[in-house]
Amino acid sequence: MIDPEKIDFTLLPCVDLSDRNTMPKAAGIYFAIDSLGVIQYIGQTKNLNQRWRNDTHHKLVQLEGLGEITISYMLLDESLLEEVESALINWFQPVLNGVGMPVPLLDGMDMICRLPQLMEARGINQKQLAAATGLSPTTVSKLYRNQLDRFDKNTLLAICKYFECRSINELIEIVE
């Protein structure tokens, strides 16, 4: 089984979304990755070239709307596609796979991450914040879009330290 933590996306073969017709005619898992390095969608197919040929992919319009997208892929035996795809989606939780969406808490309560407001006040973007804090662009993006349902202590501390928050309430707000 593939360990998602050990995937180095810089070593995977990739094509720009506009060059998707050049993908190999082989089975594999593919990752649609935006310009910040955030995985927006993960899929699997028995034929990468056929899956992305023409304008038939069901997520193509959404991906094109995100700007610069790269399709990275790993070739796999067809018998492993379902299991590996499921594990990778569970690990990375790409938004366009229908996961990573904000989950309501108890009876009408929710947690809102105030990262967009903090970043706007500081005049920085997600890529700059990731570089300044050492956090992954995926983590910053999920926090920015309020798409985490678990918060890592070190992640919260890194962000609070960067923005000089005196309380976690400056970063996260509970609303009804």
Image: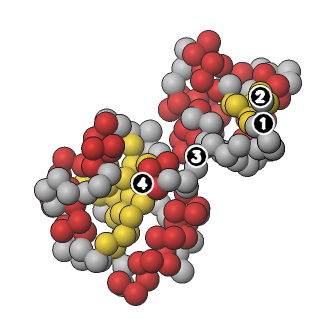
Taking the spot 31% from the left edge, 36% from the top edge, the residue there is 65
Location of the C terminus by quadrant is top right
Q: Is residue 73 above or below residue 63?
A: below
Q: Which residue is mark 1?
A: 109
Which tag is nearer the camera, tag 1 or tag 4? 1
Taking the spot 48% from the left edge, 75% from the top edge, the residue there is 84
Q: Which residue is mark 3?
A: 101
Q: Is residue 135 above or below residue 83?
A: above
Marker disc for residue 175: 2
Helix, strand or loop under label 2: strand
Q: Are the residues at dot 2 and dot 1 in contact (C-beta closer than 8 Å)?
A: yes
Tell me the distance, in whole angstroms, between the alpha carbons under discs 2 and 3. Answer: 17 Å
Position of 48 with respect to 8 (left or right) is left
Q: Is residue 39 above or below residue 86?
A: above
Q: Are the residues at dot 2 and dot 4 in contact (C-beta closer than 8 Å)?
A: no
Position of 143 with respect to 166 (left or right) is left
